[in-house]
Image (cartoon, rainbow, N blue to C red):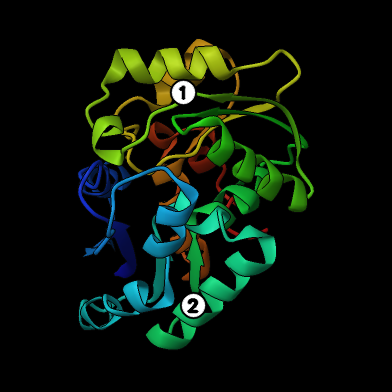
Amino acid sequence: MTTVGLLYPGHSAEDDYPRFEVLLDSDIRLPVVHTDIGEDAHRVDALLNMGSPERLAAGVEELRLAGAESVVWACTSGSFVYGWDGAHEQTRALALAAGLPASSTSFAFAHAVRALGAERVAVAATYPEDVTAHFTAFLKAAGTEVVADRASGIITAAEVGTWGRDEVLELARAGDHPDAEIVLLPDTALHTAAYLPELEETLGKPVLTANQVTVWEGLRLAERRAWAPKLGTLFAKRNQIRI
């Protein structure tokens, strides 16, 4: 059995993770511990507070008791707002607190893009423009070219969590660009586990979503290979874990 521990801010789309367990159809477990988010707002100051070391460290003991072999801060905006260097400091502090390999959804995106051999991406974000710009800057620091970034202006994760299939597909279509090799949907508050094959079929290219890459990153850290085509191109490559 492989257990990937997830620190998830608040309550929005955490039910994606039990669905991933079912779709992986293996002995992989994905326990979720909810962190205190403070204020639910896609605003830089609130996101910096949400991702503070103290808030993340508070949940690691429960994950250790659950047998976690790796820990991922399952939040994109609450990591990339720290910038490339600051996000590294955040994950180093998390690893130290947990005593386990640790990462965040922001780094999961960077690593997954590299694993798929892509250089140019489009970003289809739920966030306001200024927060989306922080994600674009993070990707550029990772060496990825962002050919388009669409901001939807949604302020709260709670609102994003209410979006269903139609809204998710429209977000991806609106954010796509002809020059993009991959489209990124960077919000763990967005339900996407049920729509991954349809997203890729609709756009005709790989799609990376926040909860999807979070699971992949945790497995990568645990050195566990997983093959599950229903979870998109990222999980359809049998050798996808090592990058």
Mark 2–mark 1 distance (CA, rounded to whole Å): 33 Å
Q: Mark 2 = which residue?
A: 101
Amino acid at circle 1: Ser
Q: Quadrant of residue 113?
A: top right
Q: Earlier in the sequence, mark 2 or mark 1?
A: 2
Q: Position of residue 93 (x, y in %)?
A: 50, 81
Residue 71 image position (x, y, % from top left): 40, 70
Q: Is residue 142 above or below residue 123?
A: below
Q: Which percent across, then down, holds residue 72?
A: 42, 64
Q: Is residue 216 visible?
A: no
Instruction: Establish if 157 lies above or below 93.
Output: above
Q: Residues within 10 Å of mark 2 (few under 14, many from 20)?
A: some
What residue is at 37 percent from the left and 61 percent from the top?
50
Q: Is residue 201 above or below residue 92?
A: above
Q: Using residue 112 as the reference point, say whether residue 187 is left or right of it.
A: left
| 120 relative position to 154: left or right | right
Which residue lies at the image location 48% right of the left edge and 73% below the top edge?
102
> Closest to the observer: 131 or 213?
131
Q: Residue furthest front?
A: 45
Instruction: Residue 242 in the image: state x and y as whole percent.
Output: 63, 60
Q: Which residue is mark 1?
A: 152
Quarter of the C terminus within the rendering: bottom right
Q: Residue at x 39, y 56 (%)?
A: 74
Tag 1 secondary structure: loop
